[in-house]
């Protein structure tokens, strides 16, 4: 069995490789070659923790396994990341455990890759202004992955906690792009691509804010009760998601569904756009929205790539199990 510790991951997979793995698995999901199993997420009644697992199987790549972990709010005081996860891969032919892979950095890379895949396939071709809503841990990964997809010439950003905006400014500077703090009205009017990545439980970006053709990647809402975008904006946009079952239950679309503004049939799969079975955006004037809920197959795809690279580079720890 191969072990790839968390500390080794950064040297083993690039954002571009994570992008390829995620784009392929979204395509497999829409061909029905890959499927996710129902998600478990529970408050365990200890340390205020939320614990769960996401699992699935990709018949194309034979990636089988699960990501297990969750959110421990007290970890920061212990010098640890609040989000903790580990990926377990199994041999699809025998069921033997094939690998254990640190899942923290992989989660950020696969989540950023998902919104980048949506930008590649859905954003206006001539997009120049990237709007960021959210300045937490994930936001830097999101920005780095997004800028590879269009020729952005500036980044504008808003955050509920303005003191955190320095993360966006620093990341934009690292990427050689000017950054400006902006109001939500300004983001809605000027940004060609908007990424929302917050833990908000009430809408931030309102329908009235968004003018003209825009692609919105909603990446923060991954749990029942979270919300970043006005349900009326979700209803106005052309909607796509990684997985419809999650979109309507734990994703951004949950609110437009419960308000009766859209039905399940009104949500498309990004994988169908990747496969050429859904035309996606037709003109640069439309508003497209990607509801990125985060599926277990994304984790398995990047973890399988990491195991492959670790073995190629001779850094995999191989133990009898
Ligand atoms: P973080 O704790 O580092 O940052 C939280 C962000 O949310 C900050 O920008 C903060 O200012 C903002 N925020 C906090 N409370 C808010 C409120 N009441 N209203 C508006 N904004 C608020 O978290 P992170 O690691 O950057 O993750 C951000 C979100 O992304 C979380 O909700 C997390 O669960 C989600 N996430 C989703 C996926 C996915 O696959 N879709 C993957 C990883 C993380």
Image: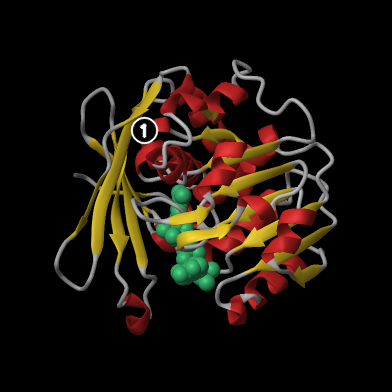
Look at 60% across and 70% down and name the residue there.
159
- Tell me: 245 left or right of 233: left
Look at 30% across and 38% down and name the residue there.
55
Q: Quadrant of the N terminus?
A: top left
Q: Nearer the viewer, residue 230 or 7?
A: 230
Q: Nearer the viewer, residue 187 or 208?
A: 208
| Res 53 visible | yes
Horizontal and vertical percent position of residue 115: 59, 45
Q: Quadrant of the C terminus?
A: top left
Horizontal and vertical percent position of residue 204: 56, 61
Horizontal and vertical percent position of residue 130: 74, 55
SS at circle 1: helix
Horizontal and vertical percent position of residue 141: 59, 58
Q: Quadrant of residue 36?
A: top left
Residue at label 1?
245
- Tell me: 104 left or right of 179: left
| Res 2 visible | no
Q: Quadrant of residue 246?
A: top left
């Amino acid at each position: 069995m191969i072990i790839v510790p968390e500390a080794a991951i950064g040297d083993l997979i690039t954002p571009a490789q994570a992008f390829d793995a995620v784009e392929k698995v979204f395509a497999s999901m829409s061909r029905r070659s890959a499927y996710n199993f129902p998600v478990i997420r529970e408050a365990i009644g200890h340390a205020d923790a939320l614990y769960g697992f996401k699992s699935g199987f990709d018949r194309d790549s034979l990636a089988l396994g699960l990501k297990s972990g969750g959110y421990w709010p007290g970890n920061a005081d212990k010098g640890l990341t609040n989000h903790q996860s580990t990926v377990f891969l199994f041999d699809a032919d025998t069921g033997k455990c094939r690998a254990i892979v640190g899942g923290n950095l992989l989660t950020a890379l696969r989540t950023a890759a998902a919104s980048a895949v949506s930008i590649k396939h859905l954003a206006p071709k001539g997009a120049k202004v990237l709007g960021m809503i959210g300045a937490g841990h994930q936001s830097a990964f999101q920005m780095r992955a997004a800028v590879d997809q269009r020729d952005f010439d500036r980044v504008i950003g808003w955050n509920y906690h303005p003191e955190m905006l320095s993360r966006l400014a620093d990341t934009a500077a690292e990427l050689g792009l000017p950054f400006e703090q902006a109001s939500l009205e300004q983001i809605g009017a000027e940004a060609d691509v908007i990424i929302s990545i917050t833990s908000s439980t009430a809408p931030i970006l309102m329908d009235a804010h968004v003018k003209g053709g825009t692609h919105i990647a909603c990446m923060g809402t991954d749990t029942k009760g979270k919300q970043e975008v006005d349900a009326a904006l979700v209803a106005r946009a052309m909607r796509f998601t990684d997985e419809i079952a999650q979109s309507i239950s734990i994703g951004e679309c949950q609110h437009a569904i419960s308000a009766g503004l859209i039905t399940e049939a009104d949500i498309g799969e990004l994988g169908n756009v990747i496969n050429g079975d859904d035309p996606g955006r037709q003109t640069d004037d439309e508003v497209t929205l990607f509801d990125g809920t985060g599926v277990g197959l994304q984790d398995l795809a990047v973890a399988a790539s990491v195991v492959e690279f670790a073995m190629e580079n001779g850094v995999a720890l191989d133990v009898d199990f």
